[in-house]
Image (spheres, grey):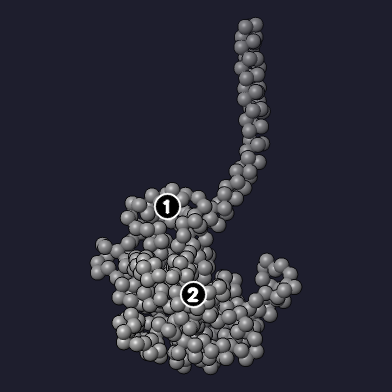
Amino acid sequence: MWGLGFTSQRSRFAEHARVGFRAEAPGKVRAKQSEAAVAEALRLALSDAGRYRLVVVDRGAEGAVRHVLHPEEKEVPADSPLANRPPPPPRSELLIVARLSEDCHRSDRVLFEVKRIMDHLGADKLDGLCVPWPAVGEDAPLDPHHTGPDCRRQKKLFLRTWRTLHKELVGKKIRWLGTELLDAWQLERVVEDVSEVERPVFNVIHMDVGSPKTRTITWCQAHGIEILGLLDTSEDKIQQGIEKFRSLSEDMGVEPAVLITRWAVQRGVVALPSVSRVVAEGSSLTSAAAYEAWADKLLRILASRTLHLHMPTEARRVNLTNERLALMNAFDQDQNEKQLYYDQRLAEITRRKLKPVRTAAKAITALGAFSTAGVLAAKDRGEEAPEFTL
């Protein structure tokens, strides 16, 4: 079933939670309507049709998530259409992961920020917490090898926050502690200075088909760190071979977003496909008919991305063969650019090395032609043929 990476037996995330819902923060424009759209999208995702069980909460989206997870906090009239909505799944079936801000590394701020997040969510415990890397200094010089004083400052601040969370909250109010948007070199700095117990459980990254972050994923999987991918499922990220991708989608009979989601899952990534464009459409609805059409569209999109996880038999699931996985991996833009560069360099080096060889070959050919002409001329004169050597 899995192309590579973690399987449901090895992963901390059960198979039904290999695809999660990202509750994105409402926009500044029409904030109330946006929060309502985010809450409605989450309610549809947790419904029996969507069956999402992993929720990653962005900074600022705690209110929308609380509205869905704790409907009993608001009294709804019996004659209201909202009174007949089914309750959310039990908290024991859900995995809630929250994200800290970059300001969490200020002195004594991280514990206050975690408390604020939990209060706004109405939760007494989180399944996961994402810790970002400290921001780069405004006057920091370019440091391609990541050995300068600013990198050392960032590492010191991160480790201070990390150890504070492990000491005060992990095992009590936080189940797993993970990192957010860290590259391989940053994870190396963390792993080399913490104990085995304090290692990150997961790392959140941005990814898409054109930029699959292969190096970071490979490094994390080699060190037992799971990947939560904030997945862009639009085919616009494919710069070369878009026709091959569309042909593959048509052959399998699935939408491009479903194909990209399955590709991420088979790479061992816990996928969090974005639905921000569709949710944004529900932020300015003015009629009941428009709302019902939007809700049906959103529910169809959400259900299609998790349907293959709940199929009763393996044969009915959306599954990519090794050949199809290789085709999907060929859309890696970074790898294609590197391969093009290596091919050009190899052609240039080969041309340089073959130049003296071609010169020598021309000389040998010319000498052979001269030798043949001399032998024929000597025979015509009845003389002994001369010997030509290099």
Question: Looking at the picture, does residue 269 appear above or below residue 336?
Answer: below
Q: Secondary structure at mark 1?
A: helix
The answer to which image quadrant residue 141 occupies is: bottom right
The residue wearing badge 1 is: 245
The residue wearing badge 2 is: 34
Question: Looking at the picture, does residue 251 appear above or below residue 271?
Answer: above
Numbered badge on residue 354: none
Amino acid marked by disc 2: Ser
Quarter occupied by the C terminus: top right
Viewer-side residue, 57 vs 180 = 57
For residue 127, say whether it is visible: no
Name the residue located 71 percent from the left edge and 67 percent from the top edge: 142
Name the residue located 50 percent from the left edge and 78 percent from the top edge: 32
Q: Residues within 10 Å of mark 2 (few under 14, many from 20)?
A: many
Q: Residues within 10 Å of mark 1 (few under 14, many from 20)?
A: many
Quarter occupied by the N terminus: bottom left
Q: Position of residue 364 (x, y in %)?
A: 63, 27
Amino acid marked by disc 1: Phe
Name the residue located 49 percent from the left edge and 83 percent from the top edge: 62
For residue 94, say whether it is visible: yes
Q: Position of residue 123 (x, y in %)?
A: 44, 89
Number of residue marks: 2
